[in-house]
Amino acid sequence: MTKSKFIDSQIAYILRQAEEGLSVEEVCRKSSKSAQTYFYRRKKYGGSMPSEMKRLKQFEEENKCLKTIVADLSLDKEMLQDVLRRKL
């Protein structure tokens, strides 16, 4: 997935504009993004403040690291069990 060119506060501002009454098409035209991108961000960040968005990204990054660790440990466990089975 590509990194967004917008920072959290800009995304929050774009979403807030549409909530305040501007049409989605107008908001998308001003921000040079498609309506699909707007609705994706609204689904993901809707109602969040920039600080909450930052915390969400930190949690996602931490979760990604933890999943990698679990996958590595599971692979190690499987390899060790295979070695034990062969010795018996």
Image (cartoon, rainbow, N blue to C red):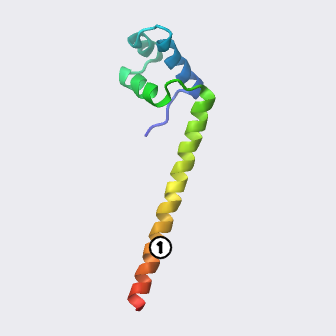
Q: Amino acid at mark 1?
A: Lys
Q: Which residue is nearer to you in this view: 30 or 85?
A: 85
SS at mark 1 in the image: helix
* Vertical side of 83 occupied by 16: above or below: above
Residue topped by disc 1: 77
Q: Residue at x 52, y 16 (%)?
A: 16
Residue located 45% across and 37% down the image: 2
| Quadrant occupied by the C terminus | bottom left
> Quadrant location of the N terminus?
top left
Query: Which residue shows up at 42% across the image and 91% down it?
Result: 87
Corner quadrant of residue 25: top left
The percent coordinates of residue 76 (x first, y second) are 48, 72
Residue 39 position within the rendered picture, expressed as x and y whole percent measured from the top left: 40, 24
Task: Where is residue 84? Give x, y as percent.
Answer: 44, 85
Q: Where residue 26 sits: x, y (%)?
A: 42, 10
Say above or below: 25 vs 66: above
